Amino acid sequence: MVKKRFKIAVLVIDMINDYLSPAGKLYCPSGRLIIPAVKTIIEQAHLSGWPVIYINTAIKEPTAPLARKWGLHALKGTRGAEVIPELRPGQNDLVVEKENYDGFFGTDLEKILKDLGVDTVVAVGIHTHVCVLLTALGAFYRGYKVIALEEGMTTDKPDNHTSRLPFFNSHIGQLMTLEEFLRAYSGID
């Protein structure tokens, strides 16, 4: 029996210095805990030939909605808006900068996914209840199959994390563990 092949892209959402470095402006200590799982899925994507797309907050103006809500952080062109060193993008990885929670809003993400022939996205990153959820929802609205990896996302508000996880299964796509995903999509036993 031949397994159906999917054109998968991994979306790595907001794994940036201002959120994940202790000196970051909006440091989320629990974000450090998901780095090994995110690194594993990135490595598997590279081995499988799947595109990896980093979706990073990169605020251009202090009047941007996220800056007004959370204070000026992840300023475009600064270290705070760069991916943490442990997950630095590879030579063929792509970076999409956003100024909102949803990685599709006001960006070229949809065009990039279409140009790559992607039909399935795997969402990882922070924060579960905002940027990961709204980017996953944006993908769902655009017709993509959406998979969210449970140990590949978190937030600094545990109740928000826990309460949003079921929504990925019930309304958007699939919530899987990293192990389930690897077994189902990469042939790893």
Image: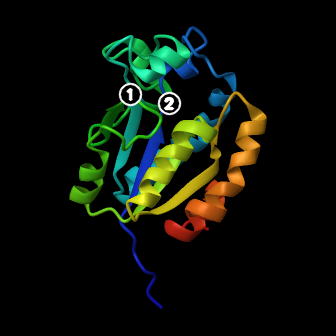
Considering every residue shown, the one lying at the far top of the view is 23
Where 57 sits versus 167, above or below? above
Q: Residue at x 59, y 67 (%)?
A: 183
Foreground residue among 68 and 46: 68
- The residue singled out by tag 1 in the image is 99
Snapshot quadrant of residue 174: bottom right
Foreground residue among 116 and 186: 116
Q: Residue at x 34, y 51 (%)?
A: 51
Q: Are the residues flagged by discs 1 and 2 in contact, CB closer than 8 Å?
A: no
Where 147 sits versus 97, above or below? below
Q: Looking at the figure, which quarter contains the C terminus?
A: bottom right
Which three-letter amino acid code belongs to the residue tagged 1? Glu
Instruction: Indicate the position of residue 142 as horizontal and vertical percent values.
Output: 38, 60
- The answer to whether residue 153 shows anywhere in this view is yes
Could you tell which of marks 1 and 2 lies nearer the N-terminus?
2
Is 20 displayed left or right of 47 in the figure?
right
Foreground residue among 172 and 65: 65
Mark 1 to mark 2: distance in Å? 15 Å
- The answer to whether residue 124 shows anywhere in this view is no
Where 112 sits versus 71, above or below? below
Is 86 displayed left or right of 89 in the figure?
right
Q: Residue at x 63, y 37 (%)?
A: 34
Instruction: Indicate the position of residue 188 as horizontal and vertical percent values.
Output: 56, 65
Instruction: Indicate the position of residue 165 as horizontal and vertical percent values.
Output: 69, 51
Q: Which mark is residue 15?
A: 2
